[in-house]
Image (cartoon, rainbow, N blue to C red):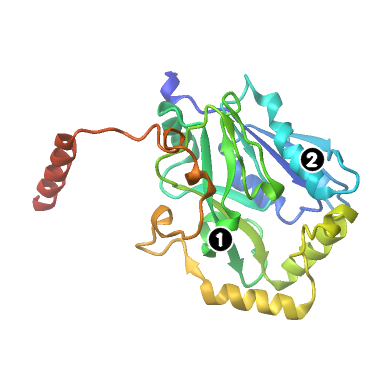
Amino acid sequence: MTWWLRKPIVHLYAPCLNEERMLPFFFRHYESWVQRFVIYDSGSTDRSLEILAARSDVEIRQFPWTDPNSFVLSHQAMQNTCWRESRGIADWVVVTDIDEFIVHRRRSMPSYLRWCARRGITCVPALGYQMVTDAFPSPGTDLAKVHTRCVPAWMMSKLRLFDPRCVEPNFGIGAHTAVPSGRVVYPWRDNLLLLHYKDLGREYRAERNQLLGAALRDRDRANRWGFHYRTDSAWLDQHFDELDRQLIDLAAPGYVPWRDHGGRRYWRSGPRRERDAHHPRRSPWYWLWKRARALLRRRH
């Protein structure tokens, strides 16, 4: 097979804590374009380990508590180092969470990654969306295709996909920011989306908040990391009411994420040579010809 049609090699790294309900959706979404999953379990007591062990493309590891007093700092350290073993093996790595789904609306991911590689792109940040459902989805659902109601959330826009041969991501707390170093080249247009499926009904959100809040350590609480893991019904009602007021549908005609997603995009504040080094420098004659061709097509 010619190199430009070869399926990119992708490795994915993620932590896991009692994710038996989300794992089937997670693998259904990623298994078509990720060849290797490395999952760091931090003490699951449900069927998560059983589900993971049943897959030949999954390697289970123990979550590394590099800071015994902080889950958040240990998680940050894991995300900044776990992917390095893929250098020289994978074309791309994904460093994410089980409830985060990377999506391109118009292209398959292998096709999009080949497109990025041909243009020398090495970092592909994704625009964040807080996905919302009234109740937990039924088994067998393709979440990214079926459940598209959401709220654009700039704090959930993250760098989750990059070339391990060229880049050190340097993630911040929760990967809400990153200061990548190396040969950093972003796409000119932000077409990749990061769908966060954590608000899958009030019951599920309360259950996850209780579990994740209990996993926090003293240093996390002292710094108010994970303060949003609240379980009181008044907060949950207010949270979902606020989401309902801001809901949009990603599948709505006319909605263009790269244009319509508001809020700050931290990766657009870097030097111009990094921000759009791959942007095609076309002559004015090219754009005139393209416009004329479009007009001729409309007439026919």
Q: Which mark is residue 40?
A: 2
**50 w.r.t. 236: above or below:** above
Q: Residues within 10 Å of mark 1 (few under 14, many from 20)?
A: some
- Res 54 seen here: no
Q: Position of residue 156 (x, y in %)?
A: 60, 55
Please tell me whether residue 69 is drawn above or below residue 13 in the rendered image. Answer: below
Nearer to me, 206 or 261? 261
Cβ–Cβ below 8 Å for labels 2 and 1? no
Residue 78 lies left or right of residue 36; in this view the side is: right
| Residue 246 place in picture, x, y as percent | 52, 72
Secondary structure type for disc 1: loop
Residue 44 position (above or below residue 274) = below
Find residue 168 and report its image quarter: top right
Label 2: element kind: strand
Residue in front for this viewpoint, 190 or 221 = 221
Q: Residue at x 73, y 76 (%)?
A: 235
* Type of amino acid under label 1: Ala
> Which dot marks residue 153?
1
- Residue at 42% x, 23% y: name it: 4
- Side of 113 relative to 157 (left or right): left
Looking at the figure, which quarter contains the N terminus? top left
Label 2 Cα neighbours within 10 Å, binned few <14 / some 14-19 / many ≥20: many
Q: What residue type is labelled 2?
A: Tyr
Give coordinates of residue 231: x percent, y percent: 79, 71
